[in-house]
Image (cartoon, rainbow, N blue to C red):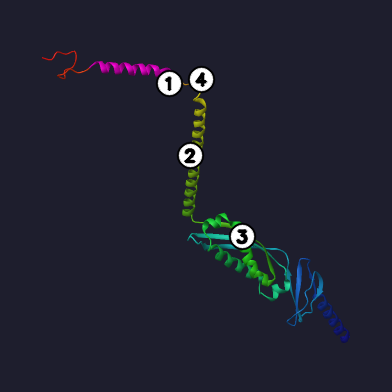
Amino acid sequence: MSSLIVVSVVALLVVAAAVSSVRVIREYERGVTFRLGRLRPLRGPGPCRVIPGLERLVRVDLRVVTLTIPPQEVITRDNVPARVNAVVLFRVVDPVRSVMEVENFAVATSQIAQTTLRSLLGREDLDTVLAHREDLNERLGEQIAAQTVLWGVEVRLVEIKDVEIPEAMQRAMAKEAEAERERRAKIINARGELQASAELRQAADTLSPNPASLQLRYLQTLLELGADQNSTVVFPLPLDIVGPFLNNMSKGGTERTGGTGSTENGAVPGRVVP
């Protein structure tokens, strides 16, 4: 009877050990197995057996991991302090190397990303950081990937999320942008006046040979003034009409001036000098 109990207990232990030795690896995972400390072949998805006490199974996730880089204090090349954070997307492409070459590939990738972010942005101006993010993202990805490829990790994407600068610098940049817009507006206005003057000169050259066209232009100007309900009446007189009157007036004045001469003793005509 006692022997039967012992056999039953042993059988239960064997069944329990057999059941506990079964592992199921998911489709997006790979299993790195060590037997007595030595590396065994890589195991794919599905059920597998791990000998308790002799083997150890390390699961490696092959899905893309989203890593958020915490805000980093950066001083740009033009001595402007800034806080920059970013996001890194990476995945394991070689499960064996991700286990054998580095203790924790996720932590190592995070530290490399933070160090590279501070180092790269510290060599650039603030204007470059704000205006050329695509180039910086590409360079960040290349530098981080050059380190993580040794661990069997592939960096898919690196994006700078936000750049925080001091409020004083933000106000200075706003003033600079406003001044730049005013400068462009003045340049555009000056170019418009230059083009308008050229067009007016051409119009004057076209109208000057024909006096009738000038008269029509005068009438059109009067019509435009009257359309605005203006109480002021402007009536232009052409110089070819006013010119003869002005010439006659100038001639008459010259004749009167020439006819009133002085006497020998310097007396004024019309007066009797004693």
| Position above or below: 210 against 135 | above
User: Toward the viewer: 40 or 177?
Assistant: 177
Dots 2 and 3: beta carbons under 8 Å?
Answer: no
Badge 3: how crowded within 10 Å, few (<14), some, or many (20+)?
Answer: some
Which of discs 2 and 3 lies nearer the camera? The answer is 2
Which three-letter amino acid code belongs to the residue tagged 2?
Ala
Q: Earlier in the sequence, mark 1 or mark 2?
A: 2
Q: Residue furthest left?
A: 274
Which residue is denoted by mark 2 in the rendering?
190
Q: Position of residue 180 (x, y in %)?
A: 49, 47
C-alpha gap between disc 2 and disc 3: 41 Å
Q: Is residue 82 visible?
A: yes
Q: Earlier in the sequence, mark 2 or mark 4?
A: 2
Q: Position of residue 71 (x, y in %)?
A: 56, 61
Which residue is denoted by mark 3 in the rendering?
137
- Residue 54 magenta: no
The quarter of the picture where the C terminus appears is top left
Q: Which residues, given as a range, are shown in magenta?
A: 233-260
Q: Earlier in the sequence, mark 3 or mark 4?
A: 3
Dots 3 and 1: beta carbons under 8 Å?
Answer: no
Which residue is denoted by mark 1 in the rendering?
239
Which three-letter amino acid code belongs to the residue tagged 3?
Asn
In what element is the residue under mark 2?
helix
In what element is the residue under mark 3?
helix
C-alpha gap between disc 1 and disc 4: 13 Å
In what element is the residue under mark 1?
helix
Which label is found at residue 212?
4
Q: Position of residue 147 (x, y in %)?
A: 64, 70
